[in-house]
Amino acid sequence: MEKSILIVDDIHPVFIERVEAAGYTCDYRPLIKADEALQIIGNYGGLVVRSKFRLNKEYLDAAVNLRFICRAGAGMDNIDEAYAAEKGITLINAPEGNMDAVGEHAVGLLLALMNNFRTADAEIRAGSWKREANRGYELKGKTVGIIGYGFMGHSFASKLAGFGVNVIAYDKYKTGFSDQFAREVSMEEIVKHSDVLSFHIPLTNETRGMVNDEYLFHFKKPIFLLNTARGPILKVSAVLNAIKQGKILGAGLDVLETEKFPALEEQEWFEELRQSDKVLLSPHVAGWTFDSYRKISEVMAEKLLTLSL
């Protein structure tokens, strides 16, 4: 039982290959429902999950033999980390596996926004040729402000290295992290100097709803805003308000405070979001590439096999 692992989400088979070679047994059930998993979780020593359901107190109490949880990705917001720690459950995530995907996706969103790629493409397809209306901005010489300088923030900064930009970063929980890609600054400097603002922070009680009207009001220059972190850190209505006020020139949102349909289209701000040509959307895929699919599983397996459990 200690070496048995329940896998409740789709993962790359390299994880199973590597851990089974080391003596583990895997029960791969990516289509299992939350209530079904709850009934059997007590039979396993390990669990692998992406984001299918929340591992709350009820789940962790039912998991009487659980010694570790592997989160196939970076964010741990669907796991009650504090309660897992109380129960002596080791948590493993794999930000190293999808940090390049997130960094590249953020750069792609930014370049598309600054150069009106989506609008220009749609206009030409509709028979309209508008050069002046689609005049873009250059990244060179701009100041990019990064909020959160963990694996994802660092990856984004490193991807910007060839663009001739000034990258500054703020992280409330880290100090002394300046490197060749970014310079550590205060939040006041982020607010004063940023031409681009990109979020790379986890979802916590402190960060939920952090980016609201008041937060955006303080920025001194019109900005391009990116969120490839977690949707609930940012109030969509505040972004739309800032766009109307000219404070945000364009927003690239891979994540939203409400995701998936039909719940998304039921939000009071969705129609305005859908209509806005200043917003570029993607369906929470910044960290989900064909490459990261494998790398995440490789990282999880490596971390699990180096632990003394």
Image (cartoon, helix red, strand yellow):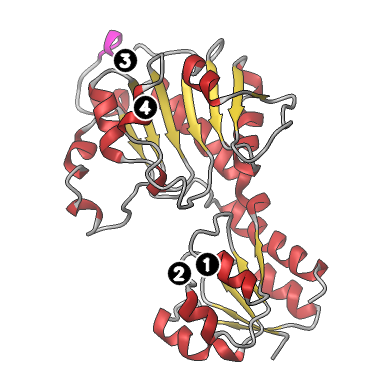
As drawn, is 13 to the left or to the right of 251?
right
Q: Are marks 4 and 3 in contact (CB under 8 Å)?
A: no
Q: Are marks 2 and 1 in contact (CB under 8 Å)?
A: yes
What SS does tag 2 mark? loop
Classify mark 4: residues with Cα within 10 Å, few (<14), some (14-19) or many (20+).
some
As drawn, is 131 to the left or to the right of 109?
left
What is the spatial separation of the Cα atoms under label 2 and label 4, in whole angstroms?
31 Å
What is the spatial separation of the Cα atoms under label 1 and label 3, in whole angstroms?
46 Å
Q: Which one is earlier in the sequence, the residue at label 1 or at label 3?
A: 1
Q: Which one is earlier in the sequence, the residue at label 2 or at label 4?
A: 2
Q: Image quadrant for the N terminus?
A: bottom right
Q: Are marks 1 and 4 in contact (CB under 8 Å)?
A: no
The residue to which callout 1 is attached is 80
Q: Which one is earlier in the sequence, the residue at label 1 or at label 4?
A: 1
Q: Residue at x 61, y 50 (%)?
A: 98
The residue to which callout 3 is attached is 134
Which residue type does callout 2 highlight?
Arg
Q: Residue at x 64, y 41 (%)?
A: 150
Q: Which residues are magenta?
A: 130-134
Which residue type does callout 1 highlight?
Asp
